Amino acid sequence: MNQELFDYPLQDAEGITCTASAWAKVPSPLSASEKTETIQAIKASLKAQNAVLVAHYYVDSDIQDLAWETGGLVADSLEMARFGKNHPAQKLIVAGVKFMGESAKILSPEKTVLMPDLDATCSLDLGCPAEDFGKFCDAHPDREVVVYANTSAAVKARADWMVTSSCALAIVHHLKEQGKKILWAPDRHLGRYIQDQTGADMLLWEGHCIVHDEFKGIELAQLKEKHPSALVLVHPESPANVVELADVVGSTSAMIKAVVEGHAKEYIVATDKGILHRMRQLAPGKTLIEAPTAGNSATCKSCAHCPWMAMNGLAGILNCLTHQTGEINIEPTLGKQAKVCIDRMLNFTTEHPELLAKAQHGFVKNIGSA
Ligand code: 13P
Ligand code: SF4
């Protein structure tokens, strides 16, 4: 396995940000015969153990196909959390990054949650350490604490609300209507976008996603000129000058919906390139163009593919099923505290589909609600 270091912004309790770095590693590729054998063995183990595979749109396409073929799910982080909670299987195999496995465990403490590699993290989670975040919250007791799903269980335990990019706009809009001031963490780009859209009073933590932060506005404008009829789809973790050029701003599932339902032939996609697999499956006749980042070689640090999502491999999935490794454990009291903000989000999204649709109409400008 090759290890590589990645820089990310780390904020402290006083609001001062520095640069820290974390490593990621890429699983060794499998030969065609190894791949076939591994897939067969995973299918047999899932069945024998009554386990279900839940994957994010950014993971390897073989893992996505395997999840669908075995009755599991490939989805955005909101639907992954909901599916894991509602599925009858007592064992969940989560292919994604650590906060996704933690959310599954918090929602279903009685279930076993395994991940192929527990070191698969997220720059947003790393950039928001619980102790500093707690002190920051203490310094602003007049604010409702709203955190993005991409955070640790300890940060969620301190929050009033958890949101994902599918429901953040609706929930912040709802809080603003109630006259609440908000402390938002950790993604500053998503926070600023929501602030602009809702006019809410939001104090922002200064984290960012190292993948989406690399999309470039000037190069995107040039690409748009070359493809004047293409629709531009942007995940709101991207910088403001990229979001400004978007026809559609939304979560991973909203972006997929835009490709499937949009009338355009060409789409410029500004998010992790892992999503292209699902888009190609659901909209085979459409042309998908990757939005520009600072570079595009396989080893660069801005290749629009999350280095931690890339740590999920078929061999890792088989390994965790065979040896029961990569288990997510959360201290029960902490889990109960963290569950409050997740339940609040799940209840809100179930009880207020009309508010979600209304807010998403703003998110998904050209195709209606997603
Ligand atoms: P979604 O909630 O849109 O799936 O995003 C999760 C994520 O980590 C994006 O980088
Ligand atoms: Fe985190 Fe960005 Fe990777 Fe998503 S793509 S898991 S936000 S680092």
Image (cartoon, rainbow, N blue to C red):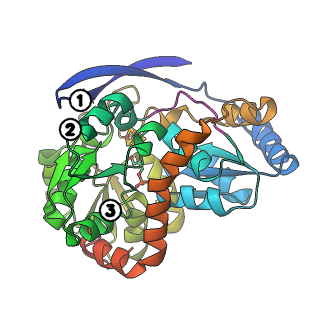
Q: Kindly identify which residue carries mark 3.
A: 250
Q: Residue at x 51, y 32 (%)?
A: 120
Q: Nearer the viewer, residue 348 or 287?
A: 348
Q: Is residue 70 left or right of residue 106?
A: right
The amino acid on which the numbered mark 1 sits, given as a three-letter code, is Ala
Residue 170 percent location from the top left of the image: 31, 69
Q: Earlier in the sequence, mark 3 or mark 1?
A: 1
Q: Quadrant of residue 256?
A: bottom left
Specify the principal SS of the magenta part.
Answer: loop
On whether ligand 1 comes within 8 Å of the CB at mark 3, the answer is yes
Q: Secondary structure at mark 2?
A: loop
Say which residue label 1 marks. Answer: 13
Whether residue 38 is situated above or below residue 181 in the rendered picture: above
- Give the residue displayed 17% in from the left and 58% down from the top: 195
Query: Callout 3, which amino acid?
Result: Gly
Expressed as whole percent of the image width and height from the top left, the position of residue 45 reads 83, 43
- The answer to whether mark 3 and mark 2 are in CB contact below 8 A is no
- Image-based side of 126 in relation to 99, left or right: left
Q: Quadrant of residue 250?
A: bottom left
Q: Which residue is mark 2?
A: 139
Question: Which of these two is toward me, 342 or 41?
Answer: 342
Tell me, for residue 275, which label it has, or none.
none
Q: Which residues are magenta?
A: 114-121
Verify CB contact (< 8 Å) between mark 2 and mark 1.
yes
